[in-house]
Amino acid sequence: MKPIASIVLAGLLVSAATSPQQQQGERSEVVAKIWAGQPVDFAMIVRGQRLYVGYYGADRRLVIASRATSGGAWERQTLDTAVGWDSHNAIAMATDGRGRLHVAANMHVSPMTYYMSDTSGSASSLRRIPALIDPAQEQRVTYPTFLKDQQGRFIFRYRDGMSGAGNDIYNVFDASTLRWRRLTQTPVLDGEGKRNAYPIGPTMGPDGLFHMVWLWRDSPAAETSHDLSYARSRDLVHWTRSSGQPLSLPIRLGNSEIVDPIPVHGGAINANVTFAFDAKKRVMIAYHKFDEHGDTQIYLARLERGGWHIAQATRWTGYRWDFKGGGTMAGEIKLSEPYQRGNIIVLQIARQGKGMQLRLAADTLKPTNAPLPQSRVRTTSGWTTVSAPPGMKMNVLTTQGNGKRFRLTWPTLPNNRDLPRAKAPAPTELRLSEQPL
C-alpha cells in the first residue's frame, strides 16, 4: 500500500490562504512547523466528525493532532519518539471498531513503536504499548500498515527483519480484551532468511477480494529485486493464485505465482510497481524493467482468461536507469496507478522530471494515440497549486470524509539515501487545505 504520493514542483511555496488562484470553497491553514530534512510519510484520517494528522514536528518528535472536521482548535499530543534522517520511518494511523486510535511510527528495522488511545479516540489518551505479541519478532520492524477485512476485523501488518532477509507478519486485534494475536500462524510472505518481499497491498478490489503484488529482493541493494509476483485472498488468511489454486502459507519464492520472471539486475524496483483494475475488474500491474537491449521500458501486465498478458508500453532507445545500492533514492521514474478511460488504458509517468501519458488500447494493450474520451463523471474542482522552495520537493497527502476532502502539503529536502546531511534545514510549514465534496 502506498498512502502518500510526492510531487516535485519548481518555484516558491505559494500560500494557499492568500493565493489569487485559490479554488472556490477551499480553505487553508498552517497546522504546524515540521522537520524538513527528508521526505517521510505522514498520516491523515477522518473518523466520524474528527480529523487526525500525524507528523514529525520541528524538533523531529512525533505529534498526533486532531480537530473537528468542521474546524476549530487542534488537540495535540507529542509522543516519546523522534525521527532521524531515514525516509522509511513512516507514520501509520487508524481507528478500530470501538473508536480507539492506533499509531505505529518511526521504525526501520527498529523495535516496535506503537501507541493506543482509549475509546474516546483522543490523542491525549495515547499510551505506548511496549510489545504486541512476541517481543522477539518485534525488534526489527518496518512498514507498519493497518487493514480492515470484510468482517471489520482490525489487522496490523509489518515486516519482521530487513531488506534481503524479512517476513511479513499479520496480527488481528481483539477489542474486548485489548490484545493482539496472530492472524496467521506463519508469516504470509517468507523470505527464508535469503530475501524479502516488497508488497503493494493487500488492496480490496472491485471483486471483493484482497489483491497483493510484490517483488522479491535478495539484499538491501535495490538492483537485486526480481520476480514480479501475485496472490489474492478473501480473508487475508487463505491465499490463492490467480487461477483460484490455494497457496499454502507461508508464501515463498518457490511457491509464488510469478507474473513476470524478472531476473536480479533486471531493472525492476519496488518503488515503481503499482496496480489497479480495468473496467472488467481485471488486475493491471504497471512496472519497469530492462528490455532485451538493456534499455529501461514501462510494462503493463493484465490478468486475462489465459493468464497474464504482458505488454510493453514504451519503446525508449538509449535510456537506462541503472540504479544501484540501498537507501531511499531519488527516482528517475515515477509511475502512477494505471486506469481505464473508455476503451483506453492510461499510464501517467514522469521520467527525469518530465511528465508524460502512455495510452494502450483496452482490448489489445497495444500503444495507441487515440484521444481520451470525455469523462462523464462529475469531478470536484482541483486544488490550489502549491510549489516547493528551490532545492526542495513538495509532499502531498489527501483523504476525505464527513462531506469534505482534505489535503496536506509540506516541503522537504529530497531523498538522500537515508544519510544525514551536513546541515539540517529550517523547519517548513505543514499546511492543511479543505474543500466540500
Image (cartoon, rainbow, N blue to C red):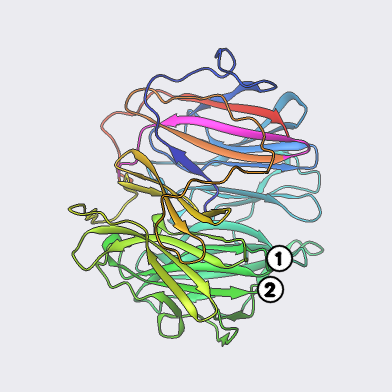
**Is 411 included in the stretch rendered in magenta?**
yes
Q: How far from the left and from the top, in percent, is residue 373?
A: 56, 46
Q: Name the quadrant containing residue 148.
A: bottom right
Most frequent secondary structure within the magenta stretch? strand
Which image quadrant: the N terminus?
Answer: bottom right
Specify which label sits upstream in the sequence, 2 or 1.
1
Q: 26 or 46, which lies in front?
A: 26
Q: Residues within 10 Å of mark 1 (few under 14, many from 20)?
A: some
Residue with the mark numbered 2: 235
Please tell me the numbered disc located at residue 149: 1
Q: How far from the left and from the top, in percent, is residue 298?
A: 35, 58
Considering only vertical position in the picture, is 185 above or below 115? below
**SS for callout 2:** loop
Q: 400 or 339, which lies in front?
A: 339
**Is 269 included in the stretch rendered in magenta?**
no
Residue at 29% of width from left, 42% of height from top? 352
Q: Answer yes or no: do the residues labelled 2 and 1 have beta carbons within 8 Å?
A: yes
Residue type at mark 1: give it: Asp
Q: Range of the magenta residues?
A: 401-416
Considering only vertical position in the picture, is 350 above or below 68? below
- Looking at the image, residue 8 sits to the left or right of residue 33; the answer is left
Cα gap from disc 2 to disc 1, whole angstroms: 6 Å
Q: 211 or 21, which lies in front?
A: 21
**SS for callout 1:** loop
- Looking at the image, residue 244 sits to the left or right of residue 258; the answer is right
Instruction: State whether residue 139 appears in this view.
Output: no
Residue type at mark 2: give it: Asp
